[in-house]
Image (spheres, rainbow, N blue to C red):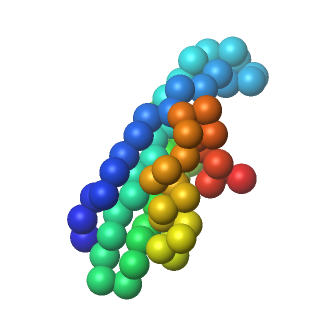
Amino acid sequence: MQMIASRTIPFLDVQSLAPGNALEALFRDEKGFILYLSDGGPSSIRQERLIRLGVREALVWLHEAPQDGASFWN
């Protein structure tokens, strides 16, 4: 597995109004692309996701404008 790109996305927690940083990383393996998402919370309550992406979706993620970041969280 090879990491293609990663980025940190700053956000404001709506409940506590505390600043935080989410992490996204795009990997490629023999089957295609995998997007790793982490909400940046403490390890005991951190939410993480792995999403298998096709080539088109991986390209969309790679070329997202900074203001459009985190679009794969929904």
Quarter where residue 3 is shown: bottom left
Q: Is residue 44 above or below residue 33?
A: above
Q: Please give left or right for residue 20 compared with residue 17 in the image.
A: left
Most foreground residue, 20 or 53? 53
Quarter where residue 65 is shown: top right
User: Hey, which residue is sitting farthest right in the picture?
Assistant: 15
Question: How many labels were placed on the picture?
Answer: 0
Can the viewer see residue 3 in this picture? yes
Quarter where residue 18 is shown: top right
Task: Give the image location of residue 52, x and y in percent.
Answer: 51, 72
Q: Residue at point 34% right, 51% down?
A: 5
Task: Give the image location of residue 66, x and y in percent.
Answer: 54, 34
Task: Give the image location of residue 35, x and y in percent.
Answer: 46, 61
Q: Is residue 15 above or below residue 35?
A: above
Q: Residue at point 55% right, 66% down?
A: 57
Q: Residue at point 52% right, 55% down?
A: 61
Can the viewer see residue 45 in this picture? no
Most foreground residue, 21 or 16? 21
Q: Residue at point 61% right, 32% down?
A: 67
Task: Give the image location of residue 64, x and y in percent.
Answer: 55, 46
User: Hey, which residue is sitting farthest left in the picture?
Assistant: 2
Q: Is residue 70 above or below residue 57?
A: above
Q: Is residue 6 above or below residue 27?
A: above
Figure quadrant of the N terminus: bottom left
Q: Please give left or right for residue 6 compared with residue 10 in the image.
A: left
